[in-house]
Structures are given as C-alpha cells and as structure tokens.
Image: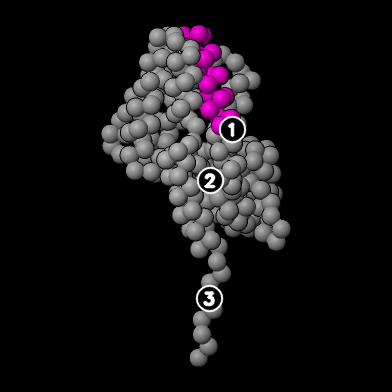
C-alpha cells in the first residue's frame, strides 16, 4: 500500500473512532500511541492527523499537540443551524429531482432505521441514519451541495451520535424521518424542507439534552487524561 493510501485509510479509521466515541472530543492524539496501535510508523499517522486537521475534526493546542476537536455549545448551535439549511436545500432539490431508484434507496435506509429503533440499538441506528441522510444528499443531483453537506456531516458525526444516546431519541428520529419520506414521495418540496429542518436543528429540550450529554462526555475525557497518582512511598 502506498503512503497516500495508507494515510487515507488511517484517517478513516481515526475518524470512525471519533464518530463512535472511542476517541472523545478533547482527547489527546499521541502519534507514538496511534502508530503502535495501528502497527505503522509515525509518518502516515502524522499525515492522517494533518488530513483530519484540515477537516476540522482535529485541532492543535499548546503543550498538548493534536487533540480531537471540541466544539463549544454556541458553536454546535451554529453548526446544526447550517446543517439544517444545507439539508433543507438537499430535500428541496430531491423532492423535484429524485428518481424511483433514489426514492427506493431512501425508503430502504428508512426501513433500516425502523428496525434499529425498534431494537433500541442506537449504534445500528446511527449508521442507518447516516445512509438515510446521504441518500437524500445524493438525490439532490447537486454535486457541490453533496460535498458541502457531507463535509459538515462528518464534523457533526460525534454529536449526532451523542444525540442518539438520549432516551427514546432513535424512535422519535424515525418518526421525523417518516414525515420527510412522505413529503419526498409526494414531491412536496416545501413540506420536505420544513420536515428535515425541524429534524436536524437543535433547540429547546433537544439542546438541553445535548448539553447534558456533552457535560458527561467532557468529564469522562478529563478523567481519562488526568495523570495517574503516584503510589505512596513505603
């Protein structure tokens, strides 16, 4: 495997660990530890971290080096507001442009969400939910919009997953998906826009739930990063 492909594979692996919570926001990314864990030299790890830095998933801090990016509550609100507008644009265009095959792909992802929500499997729902949203991006038939929505989606993955940890959120999310699917099937662009905006934007109780989850996550990160206490001398 050449260096570029290896760095890209490592980027994907680290990104997945960030998205699934194995690497929490604020966690220090030690090149030596990552190189040892993935069985590679530090060079491709350094390049993978550089790629993640460019995506906004990793940031650098004084005395700590590379860490998993951690958004403030205000920054999260702003990001979800923009995500809601981008997805609204995707839904509007998809309602006008999607093919029967693309509608079937959206419905198949929706059915996968149904099964995961019924099983109360938040992890499986996370991936089915991603397929659902990406299918709508693709159905917009606007490559630039697809790229922009996908880029912000990647930055928000850890937080969207965190939202799904809130009690009964997958079932409510699925019900919100149903309104989106119905609007797309009817070709009602404005109804699709409103349904997906209200599904994505974080406000009210959903904002409070997300902040509570973030507080727990921050406390966990701080505990993991705290230096071990020295054993008392005899």
* Residue highlighted by disc 3: 229
Q: CA distance from mark 3 to mark 2?
A: 27 Å
Residue 141 in picture, x, y percent from top left:
56, 13
Query: What is the basis of the colouring in this image?
Result: one colour
Residue 92 is left or right of residue 117, and the answer is right
Asked if the magenta segment contains residue 97, the reply would be: yes
Structural crowding at the residue carrying mark 3, measured as other residues with C-alpha within 10 Å and reported as few (<14), some (14–19) or many (≥20): few
The secondary element bearing badge 3 is classed as: loop
Asked if the magenta segment contains residue 131, the reply would be: no
Q: Earlier in the sequence, mark 1 or mark 3?
A: 1
Dominant secondary structure (helix, strand or loop) of the stretch shown in magenta: helix
Q: Nearer the viewer, residue 137 or 231?
A: 137
Magenta segment range? 81-99
- Whether the residues at callouts 1 and 2 have beta carbons within 8 Å, the answer is no
Q: Visible in this render: residue 12?
A: no
* Residue highlighted by disc 2: 18
Q: Residue at x 45, y 50 (%)?
A: 212
Q: CA distance from mark 1 to mark 3?
A: 40 Å
Q: Nearer the viewer, residue 11 or 71?
A: 71
Q: Residue 167's quadrant in the figure?
A: top left
Front disc: 1 or 2: 1
């Amino acid at each position: 495997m050449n260096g570029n492909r290896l760095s890209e594979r490592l980027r994907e692996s680290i990104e997945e660990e960030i998205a699934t919570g194995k690497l929490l926001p604020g966690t220090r990314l030690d090149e030596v530890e990552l190189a040892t864990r993935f069985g590679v030299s530090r060079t491709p790890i350094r390049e993978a971290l550089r790629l993640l830095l460019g995506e906004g998933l990793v940031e650098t801090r004084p005395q700590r080096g590379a860490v998993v990016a951690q958004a403030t509550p205000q920054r999260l609100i702003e990001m979800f507001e923009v995500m809601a507008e981008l997805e609204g644009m995707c839904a509007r265009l998809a309602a006008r442009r999607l093919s029967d095959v693309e509608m079937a792909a959206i419905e198949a992802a929706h059915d996968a969400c149904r099964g995961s929500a019924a099983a109360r499997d938040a992890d499986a729902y996370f991936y089915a939910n991603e397929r659902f949203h990406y299918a709508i991006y693709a159905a917009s038939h606007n490559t630039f919009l697809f790229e922009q929505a996908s880029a912000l989606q990647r930055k928000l993955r850890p937080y969207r997953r965190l939202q799904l940890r809130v009690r009964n959120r997958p079932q409510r999310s699925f019900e919100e998906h149903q309104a989106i699917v119905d609007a797309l099937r009817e070709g009602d662009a404005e109804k699709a826009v409103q349904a997906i905006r209200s599904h994505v934007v974080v406000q009210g109780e959903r904002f409070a739930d997300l902040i509570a989850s973030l507080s727990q996550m921050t406390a966990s990160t701080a505990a993991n990063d705290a230096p071990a206490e020295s054993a008392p001398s005899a």
